[in-house]
Image (tube, rainbow, N blue to C red):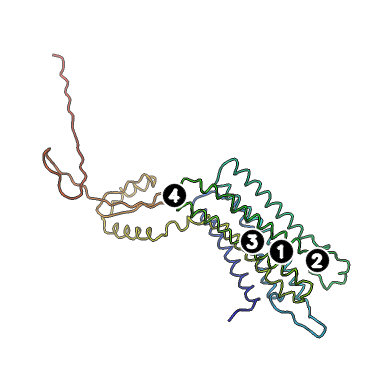
């Protein structure tokens, strides 16, 4: 059984707001694991996530108190509007402002992340131009949306006594411009790092994987395109369809999806470090090491304390039969240890069978005669 539209909007608001918050928390945890210095790309993702969550809260209030996603009641004289419409329009106004701020911060964070990992004068110039374009896009449409009606309360005060003095511009052309330029900027953000990725000195398989991670932002392009389609549909229905809470619903929940997914996709390239040590191969190695070291004799306290004072990359493991593993940086190395014994051999004696390490020592004696 299909869920009602208002229920779907509420689920989208809760699930994707939570996912955006979780992605940002994982991003900062990953930076901590890497002992990396937090950059502007990390800090920009905080307001991006906060505004995306704000969009979800506004949409949830619109569903609960503004009848968003429901059909309006019809009376003998036409549709019956109530105070719920004021709540709905307030939430829609807040959602539009927060979505522009969220998307602008998320896009800027992604470009700053590129600038953090890629170098080069040409790339620096291109990425700086892209940052300026994102800033102009966000500022222009944020304030354009904020002041499209005079006074501002005219955006929702449909039952006021002085509504005849309110002045508003037609918002649909601005909605179209926001969505189209949003999609165009997303395309630029996806295209800019690709040539640099393919110039990196790494295996082809790794290049493809890195490219796919950066191309995850293509999801936001698809959502932007869908939102444009719904804006066109709303524009055609606005003057002939009085069922406002129902026909504007798709534009609102697609806006929520775009904001949350922009935050999530912007955080994904920073998260592989959290999963680099949980591959099946590494888990198997850790179990082998655990059981083999458990069966080996325990080192003395003095030798253990001596090893603990050495840097990790300088610590020399004691050689025992079995196998062991060591994590150096982010990589795990496994080796097989063999017992060492001394064998006295003559020059013509054959080597013993099996695996062995032959160490040849030569002693050179030199004597000097004293003066008689």
Q: Please rate how many residues cluster around mark 2, counting C-alpha atoms within 10 Å: few if below 14, some from 14 to 19, many from 20.
A: some
Q: Residue at x 32, y 50 (%)?
A: 304
State the image quarter where residue 358 is shown. Answer: top left
Q: Is residue 93 placed above or below 197 in the rendered structure?
A: below
Q: Earlier in the sequence, mark 4 or mark 1?
A: 1
Q: Which mark is residue 179?
A: none
| Residue annotated with mark 4 | 203
Mark 3 vs mark 4: in front: 4
Q: CA distance from mark 3 to mark 4?
A: 38 Å
| Residue annotated with mark 2 | 153
| Residue annotated with mark 3 | 50
Q: Residue at x 51, y 48 (%)?
A: 198
Q: Secondary structure at mark 1?
A: helix
**Badge 1 vs badge 2, beta-carbon distance below 8 Å:** no
Out of 314 and 173, give the one closest to the viewer. Answer: 173
Q: Secondary structure at mark 4?
A: loop
Q: Earlier in the sequence, mark 3 or mark 2?
A: 3
Mark 1 vs mark 3: in front: 1
Q: Position of residue 74 (x, y in %)?
A: 77, 83
Q: Is residue 363 placed above or below 142 in the rendered structure?
A: above
**Badge 2 vs badge 4, beta-carbon distance below 8 Å:** no
Q: Residue furthest bottom?
A: 76
Q: Earlier in the sequence, mark 1 or mark 2?
A: 1
Q: Position of residue 14 (x, y in %)?
A: 61, 70
| Residue annotated with mark 1 | 96
């Amino acid at each position: 059984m299909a869920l009602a539209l208002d229920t779907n909007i509420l689920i989208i608001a809760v699930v994707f707001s939570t996912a955006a918050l979780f992605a940002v928390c994982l991003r900062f945890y990953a930076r901590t694991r890497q002992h990396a210095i937090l950059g502007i790309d990390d800090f920009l993702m905080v307001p991006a996530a906060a505004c995306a969550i704000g969009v979800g809260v506004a949409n949830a209030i619109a569903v609960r108190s503004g009848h968003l996603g429901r059909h309006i009641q019809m009376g003998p004289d036409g549709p019956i509007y109530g105070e719920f419409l004021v709540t709905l329009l307030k939430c829609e106004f807040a959602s539009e402002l927060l979505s522009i701020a969220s998307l602008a911060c998320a896009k800027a964070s992604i470009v700053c992340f590129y600038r953090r990992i890629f170098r080069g004068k040409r790339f620096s110039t291109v990425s700086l131009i892209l940052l300026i374009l994102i800033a102009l896009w966000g500022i222009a449409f944020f304030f354009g949306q904020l002041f499209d009606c005079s006074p501002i309360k005219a955006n929702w005060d449909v039952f006021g006594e002085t509504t005849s003095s309110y002045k508003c511009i037609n918002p649909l052309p601005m909605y179209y411009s926001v969505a189209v330029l949003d999609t165009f900027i997303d395309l630029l953000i996806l295209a800019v790092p690709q040539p640099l990725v393919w110039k990196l000195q790494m295996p082809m398989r790794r290049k493809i994987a890195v490219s796919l991670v950066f191309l995850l932002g293509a999801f936001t392009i698809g959502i932007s395109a869908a939102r444009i389609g719904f804006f066109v549909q709303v524009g055609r229905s606005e003057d002939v369809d009085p069922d406002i809470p129902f026909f504007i619903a798709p534009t609102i929940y697609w806006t929520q999806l775009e904001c949350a997914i922009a935050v999530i996709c912007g955080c994904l390239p920073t998260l592989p470090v959290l999963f680099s040590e949980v591959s099946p191969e590494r888990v198997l190695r850790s179990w082998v090491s655990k059981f083999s070291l458990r069966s080996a004799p325990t080192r003395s306290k003095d030798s253990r304390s001596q090893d603990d004072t050495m840097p990790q990359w300088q610590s020399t493991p004691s050689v025992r039969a079995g196998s062991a593993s060591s994590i150096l940086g982010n990589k795990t190395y496994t080796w097989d240890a063999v017992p060492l014994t001394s064998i006295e051999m003559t020059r013509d004696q054959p080597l013993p069978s099996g695996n062995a390490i032959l160490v040849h020592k030569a002693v050179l004696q030199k004597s000097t005669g004293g003066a008689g």
